[in-house]
Image: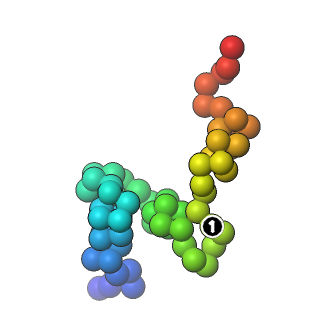
Amino acid sequence: MTDGLDWPALMRAGMQGLRLTPDAFWGLTPAELQVMLGDPGQSAPLLSDGLEALMAAWPDAAQS
C-alpha cells in the first residue's frame, strides 16, 4: 500500500539538500519537513530575520 508520498525524493531533499542525519530526518513530522523545504504552496520559508524576530517575541528562557 502506498500513501502517495515520494519517499526517495523526500529522503534526498532532507538528507542531501538539508543535510539532515537519518535520525533527524525520521524524527520530523511531515509538516516540519514541509516547512523546512519551503513548500511552494505555502508562505516563504522562515529566514534568519523572521526567526530572530520570533525568538525575541517568544524566548525559550526567561531573560534577566
The picture places residue 29, in percent across and down from the top left corner, at 44, 60
Given the current orientation, which residue lies at the most extreme right position? 57
Position of 64 compared to 34: left or right? right
The residue labelled by disc 1 is 44
Residue under the point 27% across and 77% down: 8
Q: Secondary structure at mark 1?
A: loop
Which quadrant of the figure contains the C terminus?
A: top right
Position of 20 compared to 41: left or right? left
Give the crowd class for mark 1: few <14, some 14-19, many >=20 residues within 10 Å: few
The picture places residue 40, in percent across and down from the top left corner, at 57, 77
Q: How is the image coloured?
A: rainbow
**Vertically, is 60 above or below 31?**
above
Residue under the point 35% across and 65% down: 17
Position of 32 compared to 42: left or right? left
Which quadrant of the figure contains the N terminus?
A: bottom left
**Vertically, is 12 above or below 61?**
below
Nearer the observer, 57 or 31: 57
Residue under the point 67% across and 50% down: 50
The picture places residue 43, in percent across and down from the top left corner, at 66, 69
Position of 47 compared to 53: left or right? left
Given the current orientation, which residue lies at the most extreme top position? 64
Tell me where residue 7 sits by quadrant: bottom left
Res. 7 in view: no
Indicate the amino acid at tag 1. Ala
**Vertically, is 63 above or below 20?**
above
Res. 52 in view: yes
The picture places residue 11, in percent across and down from the top left corner, at 30, 69
Number of disc labels? 1
Residue under the point 66% across and 21% down: 62
Given the current orientation, which residue lies at the most extreme front position? 49
